[in-house]
Amino acid sequence: MVRLGDQDLGGVFRTRKERALLAYLAVENHHPLRREALAELLWPERPEGYARTNLRQALVGLRRVIGEGYVQVTDELIHFKGGNTAWLDVGEFRQAYQRTLSHQHPSLDSCPDCARQLERAVELYRGDFLEEVSLPDSPGFQEWSVFHREQHLRYLLSALGALSDYYKRQRDYETAHQHAWRYVNLAPLEESAHRQVMNVLALSGRRSAAMEQFNTCRSLLARELGVEPAAETLALYELIRSGQLVEPPPSGARLVTGNLPSQLTSFYGRESEMEQLEQCLVNPECRLITLIGMPGAGKTRLAMQAARRKQEYFQDGVWFIDLKEGLPGSGLAERLLYGLGVTVQLAAPALEQLFRQLHKKRCLLVVDRFEGYLGETGLLLEILRREAGVKIMVASQERVNYQSACVIPVGGLPYQSGDDPAEALESPAVQLFLGRARHTRSGFNIESKNLANVTRICRLVEGLPLGVELAASALRELSSEQIAFQLEYDLGVLHTSLQDLPAEQRSMSLALERAWLRLPPELQARLIALAQQAGTFTAEASGASQDELNNLVDSSWLLSVGPGKYRLHHLVRLFAAGRGSVEVPETGPAQTVLPGKGTFIDRLEHLITRAERYGQTAGVVLVSLEEIKLEAVIPDGNTPAGSAPRGVTQAVLRRVASCLRKSDTVALLDRDLLGLVLEDLSRPEDGLRVTQKVCNALSQSLVVESQRYQVSVCMGVSIYPKDAAAAEALIERAGIALRNARQAGECCLMYTEEV
């Protein structure tokens, strides 16, 4: 059919060859065609001169019917150039089918995007290619027509088979049967078509009809080809006849369903990152995806949003596994099992249980806060080697250095700092601020008088989502102008008391503090020094080694902005500049240096409550710095020999904190007394490992204010629930152990037999 607007041109062409010429030009529109080749194709029996004359007359008739704009003609070439004004059903059919061949997905029969493309292709196929256009006197044209006719029929049959498989997998057996039945009607001698029908009928409970379809297939093959059905067809028949081919259990009966959390707030921006992530999620060759960025960059939210968009690709579910502190399990295998909703059995190794749980599963593991488990990345690779259907997406502040990992950096949201108010208002960072601000202050709206302040805030936090959200929360007490002014110099304005945010995200300082404690002391010192650098600086000007710079970049503390050029995020600069004196922080979560016995008791009471609820074993450790003695003096004219400045105790605190797990806490209880809270000691070796690390760390000398010090330590350990049922009693029990250690003059680790 040929239409021009609403007019049917089927009966307007003067000759069949004019119509054939239009069809050939339209289908072969991807390149210009030579005049002599077209003349030879359509008038092969005529001399060249007559053939070219006939072609010229056919072109005149063709352009009279469809107009001058569709066919471009020169002395040598003819080209159909319909552009956006011409639509060709066969071209659309071919493109829809071929998109499924290039689309990256785990499997065609589980891809809804490809199913939609194939449905479109099947809808467009209304008959054989050019079945109403025949030129018996033009063998070349006839051969061309037959080739495309067979090719498009192959495309259609393949699409019908794939759609039948797709809907069968969705348990939509009626739609699957419709596609399979059309397949068998178009290709009655293809056994694969009959198997499709048999399979769908059997799975939908129509076993007798499936067996009858087998008899039909066998009769056709015997009558038309004189052969018996293939072994595959016979095997399928036997499965159906014996009743072994039945509908699989409904998806609700699967052990694995997924646990992707629902989100209560809107998602803004991230179009380029989302596109890259979605391509990785459907690409079978991309198995380990890593999102890296500084605290508050929105890695977790981005990962969950992308996983939700593509969760239909993973028939065994999308699993969100948060490696935060305070959850059961210490090793990565145990934490993964816990995240998968599996109770770890003590009778078998956790690794064995994990592989058994993931065996032959097609699922996505979204692993959050992986920076604390970088030493166990090999386990992720082993999972991917063993289970081809598993894909893992990791969110981490620190880079996963494996060549098989697809690394996607996550920075701030775009913000418009130009003069165009409309563009500024539409930028994702400003939209996020507006969305969160309306929750904080009812009726808040960005107007011309405060738009400059809001864009200034977004610029100062460099679009960092957590920074934007915390700044919007501050509108409860401050104006946008006050927030922007304070952000120039003070990180403290970025805090909130909102209870629906995780504790570590209620303060930008706190979020950075947790990451800071994972940095080795030498990199902490280097970062403090770099905070004095203004703007972009070179590796040479930084005074740091290339390894130090690389480590800071890989852990998202430092931004690489070009070959040999670096800069600090504004919020990181404020944080690091404030760490110059390395003061003990006043508040904080797990693994934070906390002052005062009261805070320590509160933390311990929380630990005991969790331990009771989850049946965990926990511990409290008291460390006495019995003597701080001077090993050697490097005179600097500031510190008298034999005296220990307050910085020694602070250095001890930092060194102890670096030995703890993410779930542990250290506090300064007195001038020379430290308290440690150790959560989840399900195995004695966990507590022994931590205390041994602390002992090793404190056995090494300290350099403070150009002087070297050696610390003498006594230690007492008490275990809950054996030792006590209350926080104060547990501390008292540890105190007894500490007094015994002092009397013995050695480090004393006291574990009960039951532990």
Image (cartoon, rainbow, N blue to C red):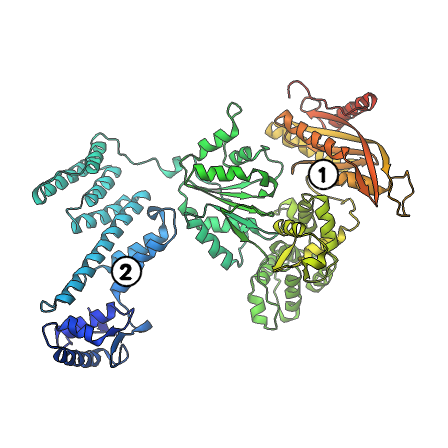
Label 1 is placed on what type of residue?
Ala
Please say if 595 is above or below 545: above
Label 2 is placed on what type of residue?
Arg
Which type of secondary structure does the marked residue at label 1 adopt?
helix
Residue at 62 percent of width and 38 percent of height? 325
Q: Which mark is residue 657?
A: 1
Please give the residue where the numbered disc 2 appears in the rendered image.
94
Q: Is residue 284 left or right of residue 431?
A: left
The residue at the far left in this view is 223
**Marks 1,2: beta carbons within 8 A:** no
Total tally of numbered discs in the picture: 2
Q: Position of residue 467 (x, y in %)?
A: 64, 55
Evaluate whether residue 496 shows in this view. no
Q: Position of residue 290 (x, y in %)?
A: 53, 48
- Which residue is nearer to you in this view: 205 or 466? 466
Q: Is residue 371 left or right of residue 32?
A: right
Q: Is residue 300 left or right of residue 647?
A: left
Evaluate whether residue 657 shows in this view. yes
Q: Position of residue 218 (x, y in %)?
A: 13, 39
Image quadrant where one finds the C terminus? top right
Image quadrant where one finds the N terminus? bottom left
Mark pair 1, 2: CA separation: 63 Å
